[in-house]
Amino acid sequence: MSRRVAAAIVERLKTVAGIRVDPKNQQFLTFRLDRRLQALGLDSYEAYLEVLESPSGEAETARLVESLVTHTTSFFREPAHFDWMEKTGLPTLNEAGAGRLHPLTVWSAACSTGPELWSAGMVLDRFSQTITGGLRWGMVGSDISAGVLRRAAGAIFTATELAGVNEERKRQYFLRSRPGVAIANGQRLYRVAPELRNRASFAQGNLLQELPDIPLADIIFLRNVLIYFAPDDRQACLNNVTARLRQGGYLILGHSDSHHGLPPGMTACGPSIFRKG
């Protein structure tokens, strides 16, 4: 891959998804994109760039984004956020009417394959069980990648992927595959139980664009996303995401994310946690 082609591909990724990749990291680019060349029957990255820049290149650009975006996730990652959600966030929201006056909604804004969303669902369900009559609640997962959204909605994981889930939660919230049903490395599979899956909906979305299809949420997880954006794109992302946050709702960022550019009215109230209004 030439420097010119690498720079053009990286610029296209930034324009479409706001994500920065160093064009000098050609080894990473070729490692991630070799399969696309094979799938298209191309013999050079110059030819691949021509496909991207052609009038019909929109579909391949979407595949480019899916190939280059890094989807790092795990169950109950940064566990302090879920502890706060259980002990402080949900009780405070419930006292203000969430779950009674309107469905209490959690949005995982870059949900990847789903562990963050399903982790929040387990916490929500447990909290609902402590409330007389239960709560009205739901979850939304979104991502720029259609491929990972399909995996998130399928809600099937290996035992290794469930490393952050304790045995009690596994028993309550997962269905285990029958003996003899396994993947190539010999692991049993687990699927999120229907009582959680039925609470979730999914939407493909680019956080750099307005998101009218996302319902107003009471808690939004936007963790470990902003670190990939340039300042202007980070600002656009924060504006679009917080526009879907209810007054009195909470935005949860990753511990490595910069909160510079948060819209006015967002107040810090915990570790990388901000309240609107």
Image (spheres, helix red, strand yellow):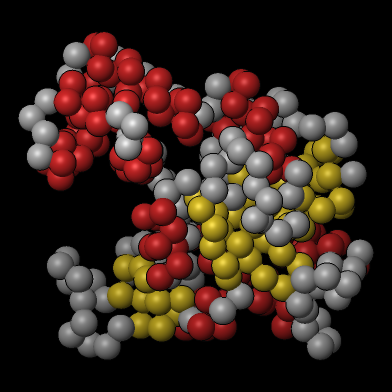
90 or 261, which lies in front? 261
Q: In which quarter of the image is residue 210?
A: top right
* Residue located farthest toward the front when viewing the structure as drawn: 55
Residue 95 x, y percent position in the rendering: 90, 67
Q: Residue at x 91, y 64 (%)?
A: 96
Q: Which residue is drawn at 74% across and 43% down?
A: 242
Q: Is residue 54 left or right of residue 19?
A: left
Q: Is residue 259 left or right of residue 267?
A: left
Q: Is residue 142 left or right of residue 180?
A: right
With respect to residue 49, does 138 lie above or below? below
User: Is there any visible trace of residue 255 in the rendered image?
Assistant: no
Residue 201 x, y percent position in the rendering: 57, 67
Which of the image's four quarters has the N terminus? top left
Q: Residue at x 17, y 26 (%)?
A: 47
Residue 27 x, y percent position in the rendering: 20, 24
With respect to residue 197, does 205 lie above or below? above
How many labels sit on residues? 0
Q: Quadrant of residue 255?
A: top right
With respect to residue 250, does 20 lie above or below? above
* Residue located farthest toward the top when viewing the structure as drawn: 4
Q: In this view, does 277 lie to the left or right of 136?
A: right
Q: Which residue is drawn at 79% across and 32% down?
A: 263
User: Is there any visible trace of residue 41 in the rendered image?
Assistant: yes
Which of the image's four quarters has the C terminus? top right
Residue 173 x, y percent position in the rendering: 51, 79
Q: In which quarter of the image is residue 55?
A: top left
